[in-house]
Amino acid sequence: MENLHDKRKVYDKSQLSENEIEKNPMAQFKKWFAEASRLADETEIFEANAMSVSTVEADGCPRTRIILLKSYDENGFVFYTNYNSKKGKSLEQNHCACLHFFWASLERQVIIKAKLEKVSEEMSDEYFQSRPEGSQIGAAVSPQSEVIPNREFLENKLKELEEKYKDSGVVPRPKHWGGYLAKPYEIEFWQGRPNRLHDRILYWLENSVWKIYRLAP
């Protein structure tokens, strides 16, 4: 077993105080996301909108994957995927998921527990048509999460659809592909601090009102 005991880092860049945070967690997220986006523009963060999304599968075990956040507002967080994928099938059975952002350069993470619902078909259509054509065709090509015979299966299907749509200029959105809105009911903001005494501020939605608590690190 490889010993990783000496892999330590001192967290001392910032702090998170109840006296300075926003009363609404979405406003607090907006503030933090703006800082992460600025660092992303300066290449200190690869993709500020990259988040892990965890869902629980039929065997009771969670599965986590990285997905890109595509929009957010006071109602929640939106991402897009194949509804027939493993995450889509999990969300059919259990409408809850955990979203997680980690911005290492800022020594921050955000953990979001949410209930998910599909966005409108109009919203999915609008986003789909905003994507590059290659991404549009890729969404139609891939039977996401299914076993396929080989790489050539995808490449041949890609060539078929590229030929099919080369003159039309419009790739229709597959009906099995679209967006989810994650409506949060718990959001935790974590700021690294020295001596592992990290700041953890929890927002909990209770009777439509956000309650704020400090958690022990």
Image (cartoon, rainbow, N blue to C red):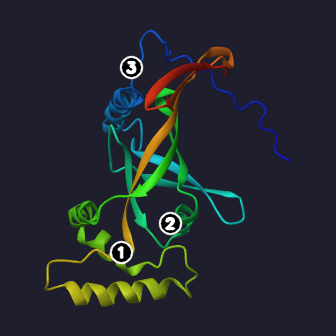
Q: How would you rate the neighbour count of disc 3 (Cα within 10 Å): few for under 14, some for 14-19, many for 20 or more?
A: few
Residue type highlighted by circle 3: Glu
Which of discs 1 and 2 lies nearer the camera? The answer is 2
Which three-letter amino acid code belongs to the residue tagged 2? Answer: Gly
Label 2: how many residues lie within 10 Å, few (<14), some (14-19) or many (20+)? some
CA–CA distance in space, label 1 to label 3: 40 Å
Q: Amino acid at mark 1?
A: Gly
209 w.r.t. 67: above or below: above
Q: Residue 115, how many percent across, how many down?
A: 49, 49
Instruction: Locate residue 146: give its quadrant.
Output: bottom right
Question: Could you give the CA–CA distance between mark 3 and mark 2, rounded to whole angstroms?
Answer: 33 Å
User: Of the residues tagged 1 and 3, which is closer to the observer?
Assistant: 3
Front in this rendered view, residue 212 or 146: 212
Q: Nearer the viewer, residue 75 or 191?
A: 75
Query: Which residue appears at 33% of the width and 77% of the height?
Result: 174
Give me the disc on residue 22.
3
Disc 1 from disc 2: Cα separation:
17 Å
Q: Secondary structure at mark 3?
A: loop
Quarter of image, res 56: bottom right
Q: Residue at x 49, y 12 (%)?
A: 17
Name the disc covering residue 40, or none: none
Residue to which mark 2 is pinned: 88
